[in-house]
């Protein structure tokens, strides 16, 4: 399978490259196949302090690697269909592997579009932001914990009001029915996951979003009662006067079992029990006249609301520099704190802060 994907990638290089279009990466013409993708080489330095790395025996660790290396093809088929195929080649994300592969019927675009195949989950603000457009190098931790699996197989119906009411896309919606077992995995039960999202933009560049997800899974324990996953979230995005402010909150409930981790390119760990979880983030950016965009981000995640003082909190400080519309560099310092158990909140350092520098080129 890996050899097949590599051969496919080499073959794709012989197709012509066109201008990027709407969506994450799409095609706005019927001129044939378009090759799209991006690469993100990255350097990370971990500040381990007095703690010793159990694998390397070091008090600090640093490495060059590829965060993402993605290559795909998109195109339109006259007159009402389009296709999107994207593969991941970075070994740190489990590559080579298939990420997205779906066909869309667009006869009633923009009001209704129907897609079938494997696609990214349409839940929340930061998850639905394309990886090549993230404001920080990494998504918030609670996104990986509460919005996974990032990709799934099924059917997606999406649309917007277009130019109705004299404004563009005042209302947009998403509704998906998926297996619930994640990318490249055949369903192992009779149940399906249901995900809905609505975005309201009453004023230009001011948007409110709400998301809901519910699904049943094959029980991990010996019980005959299926495990349940339920998520709901709200988000806000304001972009005015070169400022960009975004905030998001997600609440989760798991019955029977829960998955720890399982975000982009990773496999989660399943644990037994019932859990209530939640997390939120807020970030502020400002685009200067020098193409430098300072960013500050705060995020917090509570993995078990029934236990006091177990939250994980991160601060991200850094900046983005845009060489042009295809190339940028992101520099982030992530300051991490954790609460310890007990009768009162005690913040302590695990010596797990890190500095990350990422260069990105998209095509």
Image: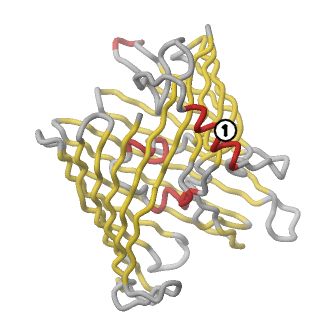
Tell me if residue 200 comes above or below residue 89 in the rendering. above
Side (left or right) of 37 relative to 252:
left
Q: Which residue is mark 1?
A: 118
Residue shown at 48% from the left, 61% from the top: 142
Side (left or right) of 157 relative to 224:
left
Q: Residue 186, position in %: x, y? A: 79, 47
Q: Residue 182, position in %: x, y? A: 68, 50
As rendered, which of 288 and 358 lies closer to the eye?
358
Question: Where on the picture, by quarter, is residue 74?
Answer: top right
Residue shown at 60% from the left, 57% from the top: 94
Q: Residue 200, position in %: x, y? A: 41, 31
Residue shown at 39% from the left, 84% from the top: 350
Residue shown at 81% from the left, 63% from the top: 219
Tell me if residue 148 comes above or below residue 108 in the rendering. below
Quadrant location of the C terminus? Answer: top left
Question: 10 Å neighbourhood of mark 1: few (<14), some, or many (≥20)?
Answer: many
Tell me if residue 151 comes above or below residue 148 in the rendering. above
Count of labels in the image: 1
Side (left or right) of 326 relative to 291:
right
The residue positioned farthest toward the top in the image shown: 79
The residue positioned farthest toward the left in the image shown: 289
Tell me if residue 71 comes above or below residue 338 in the rendering. above
Side (left or right) of 28 relative to 217:
left
As rendered, which of 254 and 11 lies closer to the eye?
11
State the scheme by which the image is colored.
Answer: secondary structure
Q: Residue 304, position in %: x, y? A: 55, 72
Check disc 1 and report its element: helix, strand or loop. strand
């Amino acid at each position: 399978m890996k050899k097949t994907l590599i051969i496919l990638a080499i073959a794709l290089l012989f197709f012509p490259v066109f201008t990027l279009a709407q969506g994450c990466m799409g095609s706005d013409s019927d001129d044939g196949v378009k090759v799209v993708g991006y690469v993100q080489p990255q350097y990370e330095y971990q500040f381990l302090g007095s703690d010793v790395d159990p694998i390397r025996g070091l008090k600090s660790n640093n490495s060059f690697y590829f965060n993402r290396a993605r290559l795909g093809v998109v195109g339109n088929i006259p007159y009402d269909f389009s296709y999107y195929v994207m593969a991941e080649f970075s070994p740190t994300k489990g590559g080579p592997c298939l990420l997205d592969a779906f066909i869309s019927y667009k006869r009633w675009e923009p009001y209704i579009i129907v897609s079938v195949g494997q696609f990214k989950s349409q839940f929340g603000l930061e998850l639905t932001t394309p990886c090549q457009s993230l404001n920080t190098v990494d998504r918030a931790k609670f996104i990986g914990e509460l919005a996974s699996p990032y990709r799934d197989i099924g059917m997606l119906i999406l649309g917007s009001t277009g130019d109705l009411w004299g404004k563009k896309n005042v209302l947009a919606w998403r509704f998906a029915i998926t297996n619930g077992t994640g990318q490249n995995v055949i369903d192992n039960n009779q149940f399906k996951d249901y995900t809905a999202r609505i975005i309201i933009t009453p004023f230009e560049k001011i948007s409110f979003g709400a998301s809901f997800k519910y699904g049943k899974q094959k029980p991990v324990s010996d019980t005959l009662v299926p495990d349940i996953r339920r998520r709901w979230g709200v988000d806000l995005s304001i972009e005015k006067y070169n400022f960009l402010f975004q905030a998001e909150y997600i609440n989760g409930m798991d019955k029977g079992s829960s998955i720890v981790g399982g975000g982009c390119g990773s496999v989660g760990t399943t644990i037994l029990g019932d859990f209530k979880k939640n997390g939120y983030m807020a970030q502020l950016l400002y685009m200067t006249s020098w193409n430098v965009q300072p960013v500050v981000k705060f995020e917090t995640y509570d993995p078990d609301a029934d236990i006091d003082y177990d939250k994980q909190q991160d601060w991200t400080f850094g900046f983005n520099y845009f060489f042009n519309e295809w190339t940028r560099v992101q520099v982030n310092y992530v300051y991490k704190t954790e609460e310890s158990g007990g009768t009162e909140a005690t913040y302590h350092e695990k010596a797990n802060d890190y500095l990350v520098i990422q260069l990105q080129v998209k095509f």
